């Protein structure tokens, strides 16, 4: 998919005496400030929804690293989400590890498993990879229920967790603390992704997506980078899974079915393939649309997801972020009074 | 030994159903090089249609054939309306559209027919044939229907002008167009046939697994495994693969991993095939030129 990448979008041509880059920084800082202030004006239920949105944003970003930036399709990222969630749940429940300390463990486990799954996936392209990961997504609930692991996973019953209390006797409630904690991790993960994509790894990923043969001719170790991308992508999704388990305080096999993986894919497609900020739009979509659509019918959210998936692929293959970029470009040209086509690149 | 034979026979019976799904997948793959992730859901929806007709008092076989016709028309329409616009898009767009289709059909089935599990009648008598418990009439019947379907398809592709045109369109679209074959319609026809085969598979499997909106997800996976094992570009290989997966799944389920991990068997078959012999047992390997 020949989508524009985040870095190349840093167009020249600022406005009101400030460069586009400065505007960007201002925008991000404002968004972070709003995000920090948000929990103090809302009910606990809405805070919980926002927390989950951030969790999904990390997962969607993870999938987008793989699918959008590296061109490998995964329909099975729910499996890595489940792996992260279960790692956290088992560590907290069986070994009494504090919740924050389980995140690196969940990330590491998913990194390793993702890398290992990426090795056979190397030989698969396009549809075949989609198929193999599709199989992974379908088999995940069964594997989680398997009776040999039942002592750890709690079988069909799953594991119930306790909600963490705010530390240092902070004057906020548990939901607000959890939200701020997840927000901090989200910011860290997004900065990590942004830095990864700007560097050597990111360039290699995009080169492999756009032309694998040319990339390997240029000296990019295709096999290593593809597996590594799979691992990193799984790590992001796994950390999201770990945070999701802490936020929902419950893990059970049947919540990690094929439709969870599809939900992440919906998030990627809606937000925009190969964009970083698109993860937030995608996550908000998959978190809030069901709430609206549930009032029509239990099946309605999925029908709406499906219709959005297809319609977006027809009319907006670059997603919400792609659309915003197009509109922003038009707006800027209109303000600058330049004729169309003489854009400020 | 008796139980082992029993497992093999019921494996062959379900294998026949997997073989039909695998065949439907291969037909679409051959023509368009797309893997249709919505194949199972299309079959499931067709089965619901025949269920409502039977419930409305129609005789089984009438409902059976009307369903096949409806599925055929629906398949053609889906190709013309939904798949056509992304025909030449990147793989990822195509996969996303198929997943969208899967989700829409699945949720529509849930919406219209609810998520409660329904029993689906079998057209075959319930008493065991020949006084032995080795195999049931339904298993024999579904095997016979699968084999009949395959023979009919073989004859169609081998001996009719339309079948020849469809093969030509799949093999070399540009030259086919030059000799006056309407390639677009041939693809649509292929989708229609695949949907019709899928609907037969759905109606044959529904008495065994019961009817609910998610009934085909596992079967689709076995169909995939069968198609890959046999070679995704080889219809006969796909059929053989379907039977092999059916037997393998049943024996592994009974003796090795237990019924809870049956789907994982399919996952393992898929990954092992893709890693060791991506072309499948009977398929060709492709070499891409730079």
Image (tube, coloured by chain):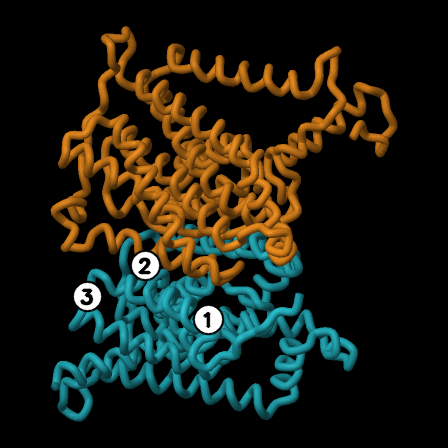
Chain colours: A orange, B cyan
Determine the residue positioned at 67% across, 32% down: A9
Relative height, residue B64 to residue A166 (above, below): below
Q: Residue drawn at (34%, 42%), measured in percent from left and top?
A: A81
Viewer-closest of B135 and A198: A198
B64 or A326: nearer the viewer? A326
On the image, which quarter does residue B274 sit in? Answer: bottom left
Label 2 crowding class (10 Å Cα cut-off): few <14, some 14-19, many 20+? many
| x, y percent for residue A89 | 22, 36
Q: Which mark is residue B278?
A: 1
Which structural element holds mark 1? loop
Q: Mark 2 or 3, which is nearer the eye?
A: 3
Task: Determine the CA span between mark 2 and mark 3.
Answer: 26 Å
**Outermost residue toward the front in this view:** A219
**C-alpha span from label 1 to label 2:** 33 Å
To the question of a shared chain for discs 2 and 3, the answer is yes
* Position above or below: A81 against B255: above
Q: Is residue B66 visible?
A: no
Residue sitting at x 31%, y 69%: B206
Q: Nearer the viewer, residue A158 or B65?
A: A158
Tags 1 and 2 touching, CB below 8 Å: no
Write down the residue under mark 2: B212
Residue B257 badge:
3
Badge 3 element: loop
**Relative depth, front residue between B151 and A341:** A341
Whether B161 is drawn above or below B115: the answer is: below
User: Residue at coordinates 77% horizontally, 79% vertically from top-left?
Assistant: B180
x and y, in percent, of residue A297 in the image: 39, 41
Determine the residue located farthest toward the top in the rendered image: A171
Q: Nearer the viewer, mark 1 or mark 3?
A: 1
N-terminal of the pair, mark 2 or mark 3, is: 2
């Amino acid at each position: 998919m020949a989508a524009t990448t985040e870095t190349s979008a840093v167009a020249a041509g600022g406005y009101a005496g400030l460069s586009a880059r400065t505007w960007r920084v201002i925008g991000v800082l404002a968004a972070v400030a709003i995000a920090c202030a948000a929990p103090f004006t809302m009910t606990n239920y809405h805070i919980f929804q926002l927390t989950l949105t951030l969790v999904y944003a990390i997962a969607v970003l993870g999938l987008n690293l793989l699918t959008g930036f590296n061109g490998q399709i995964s329909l099975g990222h729910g499996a890595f989400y489940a792996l992260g969630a279960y790692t956290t749940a088992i560590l907290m429940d069986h070994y009494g590890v504090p919740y924050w300390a389980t995140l690196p463990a969940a990330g590491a486990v998913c990194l390793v498993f993702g890398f290992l799954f990426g090795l056979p996936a190397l030989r698969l392209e396009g549809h075949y990879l989609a198929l193999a990961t599709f199989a992974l997504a379908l088999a995940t609930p069964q594997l989680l229920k398997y009776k040999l692991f039942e002592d750890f996973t709690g079988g069909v019953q799953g594991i119930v967790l306790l909600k963490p209390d705010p530390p240092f006797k902070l004057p906020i409630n548990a939901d607000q603390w959890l939200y701020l904690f997840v927000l901090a991790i989200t910011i860290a993960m997004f900065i990590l992704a942004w830095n990864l994509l700007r560097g050597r790894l990111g360039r290699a990923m995009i080169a492999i997506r756009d032309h694998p043969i040319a990339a390997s001719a240029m000296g990019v170790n295709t096999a290593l980078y593809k597996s590594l991308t799979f691992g990193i992508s799984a790590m992001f999704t796994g950390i999201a899974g770990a945070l999701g388990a802490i936020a929902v305080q419950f893990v059970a096999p049947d919540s990690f079915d094929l439709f969870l993986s599809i939900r992440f894919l919906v998030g990627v497609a809606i937000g925009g393939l190969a964009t970083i900020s698109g993860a937030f739009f995608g996550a908000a979509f998959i978190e809030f649309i069901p709430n609206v659509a549930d009032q029509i019918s239990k099946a309605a959210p999925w029908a709406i997801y499906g219709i959005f998936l297809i319609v977006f692929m027809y009319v907006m293959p670059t997603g919400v972020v792609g659309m915003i970029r197009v509109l922003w470009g038009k707006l800027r040209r209109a303000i600058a009074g330049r004729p169309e086509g003489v854009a400020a690149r | 030994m008796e139980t082992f034979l029993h497992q093999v026979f019921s494996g062959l019976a379900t294998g026949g159903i997997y073989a039909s799904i695998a065949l439907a997948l291969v037909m679409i793959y051959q023509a368009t090089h797309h893997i249709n992730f919505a194949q199972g859901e299309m079959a499931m929806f067709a089965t619901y249609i025949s269920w409502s007709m039977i419930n409305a008092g129609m005789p089984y076989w009438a409902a059976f054939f009307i369903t096949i016709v409806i599925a055929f028309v629906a398949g053609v329409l889906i190709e013309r309306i939904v798949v056509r616009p992304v025909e030449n898009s990147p793989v990822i767009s195509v996969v996303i559209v198929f997943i969208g289709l899967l989700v829409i059909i699945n949720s529509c089935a849930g919406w219209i027919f609810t998520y409660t599990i329904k029993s689906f009648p079998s057209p075959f008598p319930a008493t065991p044939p020949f006084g032995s418990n080795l195999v049931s009439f339904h298993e024999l019947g579904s095997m016979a229907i699968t084999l009949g379907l395959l023979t009919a398809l073989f004859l169609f592709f081998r001996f009719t002008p339309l079948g020849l045109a469809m093969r030509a369109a799949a093999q070399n679209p540009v030259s086919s167009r030059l000799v006056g074959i309407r390639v677009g319609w041939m693809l649509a026809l292929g989708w229609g046939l695949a949907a019709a085969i899928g609907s037969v598979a759905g109606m044959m499997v529904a008495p065994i697994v019961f009817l609910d909106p998610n009934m085909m997800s596992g079967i689709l996976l076995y169909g995939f495994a069968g198609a890959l094992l046999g070679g995704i570009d080889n219809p006969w290989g796909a059929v053989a693969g379907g039977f092999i997966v059916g037997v393998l799944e049943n024996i592994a389920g009974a003796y090795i991993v237990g019924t809870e991990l049956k789907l994982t068997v399919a996952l393992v078959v898929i990954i092992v095939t893709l890693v060791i012999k991506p072309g499948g047992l009977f398929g060709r390997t492709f070499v891409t030129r730079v």
